[in-house]
Amino acid sequence: MSDIALGRGLPGGVAVSRLRVYDWPDSEGVMGGSPHLHTASTEGYVVLAGHGSVQTLSTQGLAITELVPGTLAWFTPGTVHRLVNDDGALEILTVMSNAGLPEAGDAVLTFPAGILVDPDEYTRHAALPAAGTPYELAEAALRRRDLALSGFAELCERAATDLDAALSELYMSASALVADRVESWCGIVASGPAAQAEATARQLVQLAAGLAGDMADSGIRSAVAGPDERYGMCGMLTVWDVDT
């Protein structure tokens, strides 16, 4: 039974990765990543090194949260977020709920509205090449980042006069982009965070009866980070494979 429990992934069904935020300057000289939102997952940051901030747009309005070593910050689905790398050294341990959903397309970039309403155009601009030289991959990620920044600027301008309408339009477009993936996401959630919550509920019943329950099948697993970084939306990602 311990193999089954350990095979459900990290505590709470979360995913973690190490992120070196892009130090690429935009047209105004600001270094940082691609603004985007998650449609179903909450994301958290534990700042490891460097200094910067995260710009967010949500039902709370536009906000800027300073990020320094030791900062813990998190935000809910639908919160548009853009990481800014002030000193070029910003590194973050990201914690995502619903492990597997971000990789399955939970995130939506803030491209201009005309692209967000066209699934084919969105996919064309969002996808990075499957292979290429480091320069070609970096150039593709940079173009994607700058296009998302363009849409983010438009979104912030609309939100300044009508926040509710701007977010409603964005959320409708994002929902339409991911709608055909939701059925497969249900299985990811069921086998990850939901399975862990159900296991805890069963364990509480065992403990209330004075039984050891899952403690009788205790165990430990470990994982080593992958050797290569990959291009993410906000920076270079180091990930751990906990599925094997």
Image: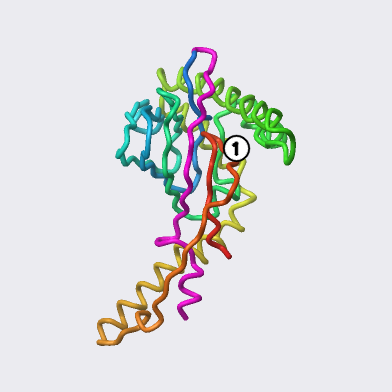
Q: Nearer the viewer, residue 177 or 52?
A: 52
Placement of 19 over or under 86, stated as above or below: below
Residue at point 37% right, 39% down? 48
Q: Quadrant of residue 219?
A: bottom left
Helix, strand or loop at disc 1? strand
Q: Position of residue 9 (x, y in %)?
A: 48, 63
Give the colouring mode of the picture: rainbow
Region in magenta: 1-28
Check the picture and name the quadrant holding the C terminus: bottom right
Identified by mark 1, the residue type is Tyr
Q: Position of residue 69 (x, y in %)?
A: 32, 36
Q: Quadrant of residue 91?
A: top left
Horizontal side of residue 124 vs 161, given as left or right = right
Which residue in the protein does label 1 denote?
231
10 is within the stretch colored magenta: yes
Residue at point 37% right, 80% down? 214
Residue at point 48% right, 47% down? 17
Placement of 243 over or under 118, stated as above or below: below
Q: Position of residue 119 (x, y in %)?
A: 68, 37
Count all numbered tags in the image, as a single digit.
Answer: 1
Horizontal side of residue 21 vs 76, given as left or right = right
Q: Nearer the viewer, residue 38 or 157?
A: 38
Residue at point 54% right, 48% down? 102
Q: Position of residue 137 (x, y in %)?
A: 68, 32
167 is within the stretch colored magenta: no
